[in-house]
Image (cartoon, rainbow, N blue to C red):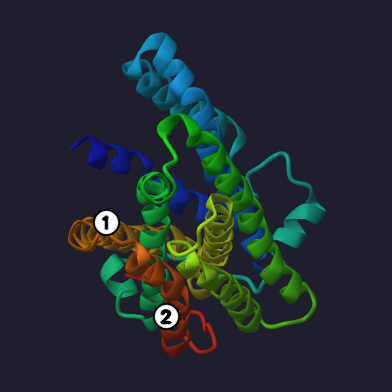
Amino acid sequence: MARFALGFGESGNFPAAVKATAEWFPKSERALANGIFNSGANIGAIVAPLFVPWITYHWGWRAAFVVLGALGFVWFAAWAWLYDAPEKSRRVSADELTHINSDPKEMPGPKIGWTQLLRHRQMWAFLVGYAFSSPVWWFYLYWLPKFLNKRFQVDLLSMGLPLVVIYTVTSFGSVGGGWLSSALIRRGWSVNASRKTAMLTCALCVLPVMLAPHVTSLWTAIGLIAVAAAAHQGWAANLFALASDLFPKQAVASVVGLGGMAAALAAMAFSESAGFILEKSGSYWSLFAIAGLAYLTALGIIHALSPQLSPAKLSVI
């Protein structure tokens, strides 16, 4: 029940963030903007192992929840003060507004229903990309400490440095993956070719993680997982950009929200399956094999559902 409450509290973050990038950046810059904001989650994952144990030791485990929870209210106040749509912001010059709106103009319209979104192949392409990749990320978050402990006898006191290294690398992957497709668009590539080339690059970088259960060196395994996790974040930056490529700005938050729900359900199923597989086999090789192949599989399905990344033609209700 506590985990559901946490999920309910964090569920608005990514839909709002992706919609904000759709409002504030043209298509040529959105993947990079997504990569930068998405790297913030990795910074949190770096900071948490350093500060949470200290807070717990000095003030108790309840204080760790209170302090981290309170930070959300601090950020909310900052967001409410700083954020507005570009057309309403007093911090935007006329030249900046022209640049932000340099893509073909979208006609505003009423709210678009979820059931209408689900009638479009583009929606299912985004759902597949999110539902196939998100469980892998949560697999790393939940099972990585146990894997390192079982395979390399890394105890709780020694876990901090490997995790900090992994999540530091992922921040570079998040920004780099977003930069790649944005750079290709600026070079004259189509949005379709740019996004899929960047996602293919990320999917190929994930493949070596299948070797992680078989290597004998701790830091070799850390390197393989760090590259895979970084590639996941680069994938995510481009996947979030697809939401605003395929749908009008007014529908982006709903699209990402539906995708997040599908991803959460898939992650729950995969986490339960991981526990069952480990209990029966005692080996991580099959889980890392799934993690390695998930992105190429998802990209193939995305391409089949939306070969040209043509925007969905929605009628408003």
Amino acid type assigned to the residue bearing label 2 in the image? Thr
Picture residue at 66% right of the left edge, 59% below the top? 32
Estimate the x, y position of residue 39 in percent, counting from the top left: 59, 48
Residue marked by disc 1: 271
Residue 268: % across, % down? 25, 56
Q: Give whichever of discs 1 and 2 has the lower sequence position.
A: 1
Res 13 quadrant in image: top left
For mark 1, give the secondary structure.
Answer: helix
Which residue occupies the foreground of this view, 30 or 288?
288
Front residue of this view, candidates 103 and 121: 121
Q: Which mark is residue 297?
A: 2
In the structure shown, which secondary structural element does the residue marked by tag 2 occupy?
helix
Measuring from the top left, give residue 287's x and y in whole percent.
34, 65
The residue at 74%/45% (across/down) is 92
Residue 312 in sight: no
Is residue 161 toward the left or the right of residue 142 in the image? right
Is the residue 311 above or below the residue 102 in the image? below
- Quadrant that contains the N terminus: top left
Category of crowding for the residue at label 1, using alpha-carbon neighbours closer than 10 angstroms: few (below 14), some (14–19), many (at least 20): some
Residue 171 located left or right of residue 114: right
Q: CA distance from mark 1 to mark 2?
A: 19 Å
**Residue 200 drawn above or below residue 252:** below
Q: Residue at x 40, y 26 (%)?
A: 69
Residue 102 percent across, percent down from the top left = 72, 67
